[in-house]
Image: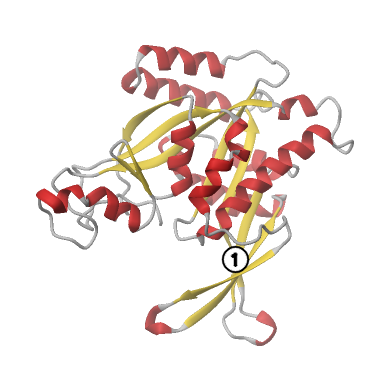
Amino acid sequence: RADGLFSPGGEASAAMPTHLLAASFSPVWLDDDEDSEDSEDSEAEPSEDAEEEEEEVGEGGNDLDVDFEFFDPTEEDYHSVGDLIKNGTWEFVELNFAELADSVVGQGNIGTLIKSEADAGAAGGVNAEATLCAMLTVLNLRQFGKLSWPKELGAALIEKAKKHADAGTLQTLKALLQAPPGDGQEVGLMLSERFVNLPPQLVPPLHKALQEDIEWSCTTPECPLDERPFYRYGQFLGVARCFEAAASAGPPGQAAGGGKKGKASAAASAAAGGAVLNGFWYPRPEDELYVRKASWSFTFPVAATSDAS
């Protein structure tokens, strides 16, 4: 699992709970030039069916060639998508994950999956095994309103906001979840799940693909005319995982202490991967970007999972 409980000392700590942050933001950030600065390491952007080859160094110094490919979600991905969602950011909610996974794989026009195949060295890749490494999609809450998961998800977020958000944010969240249909004002639930060690070069094209999917769905004759209004989003709603570190703890691999070591904690955490914003560490840099661009947000604690590390 890539999303265990984070401790700057490198160990799990029950006194340092995982935090989740609920946020709402406009689709404008998708093509903001400023955002590209956070991912300057990106190579040429592959298409949905393009293949990226990355080389990772395994234990013992052996090289492992891994091929990454972009796919549209299909019904064949039902179980792998369900597992990724259930064990991801939304595991704190008692959702009908079967329905949610079915909604994701049934919406082939919007959404992208990244899968990898690690070549075990067999001729013809006989022993190669495909693994779902990342998923990014948006589901219209009103479009799927007859299912149970939009209501369950909305109720869970409102319950968290009552305890951990200010009154203004709570009312804004309620208004967003109850927003009437309107051209260009649709509310989309962003589902962003990936392995934290996914090569960062793949993250920008993954988001670019989402933007292109939405634009295509709003303009192509292949999309039914009565369905296109659902994809004219005005706001995205999402939840990101972040971690709060003890003030006296140092960065990973460093003994706890104050002074310069304590001041260097945030910078060292960022250097080790992820990003830091307002005292919270985000293992995935794009989550910090979501929050920074959000119209509003609030954080709430969740219990550590049994396999936290």
Quadrant in which the C terminus is drawn: bottom left
Tag 1's secondary structure? Answer: strand
Percent coordinates x, y for residue 284 in the rendering: 44, 49
Percent coordinates x, y for residue 166 in the rendering: 34, 16
**Image-based side of 221 in relation to 17, left or right:** right
Q: Residue furthest right?
A: 221
Residue at image position (73%, 18%) is 183
Up the image or down, 282 lies above or below 43; here it is above
Up the image or down, 5 lies above or below 50; here it is above
Residue at image position (79%, 28%) is 228
Asked which quadrant contains residue 219, the reply is top right
Q: Label 1 sits on what residue type?
A: Ser
**Image-based side of 272 in relation to 297, left or right:** left
Asked which quadrant contains residue 21, the reply is top left
**Image-based side of 166 in relation to 251, left or right:** right
Classify 10 Å Cα crowding around label 1: few (below 14), some (14-19), many (20 and above): many
Percent coordinates x, y for residue 297 in the rendering: 42, 27
Q: Residue furthest left?
A: 258
Is residue 34 visible from the viewing direction of this image? yes
Quadrant in which the N terminus is drawn: bottom left
Q: Nearer the viewer, residue 245 or 164?
A: 245
Mark 1 = which residue? Answer: 116
Percent coordinates x, y for residue 202 in the rendering: 58, 58
Residue at image position (45%, 12%) is 171
The image's colour scheme reads: secondary structure
Asked which quadrant contains residue 181, the reply is top right
Residue at image position (46%, 42%) is 287
Q: Nearer the viewer, residue 235 or 226?
A: 235
Up the image or down, 209 lies above or below 71; here it is above
Is residue 308 visible from the viewing direction of this image? no
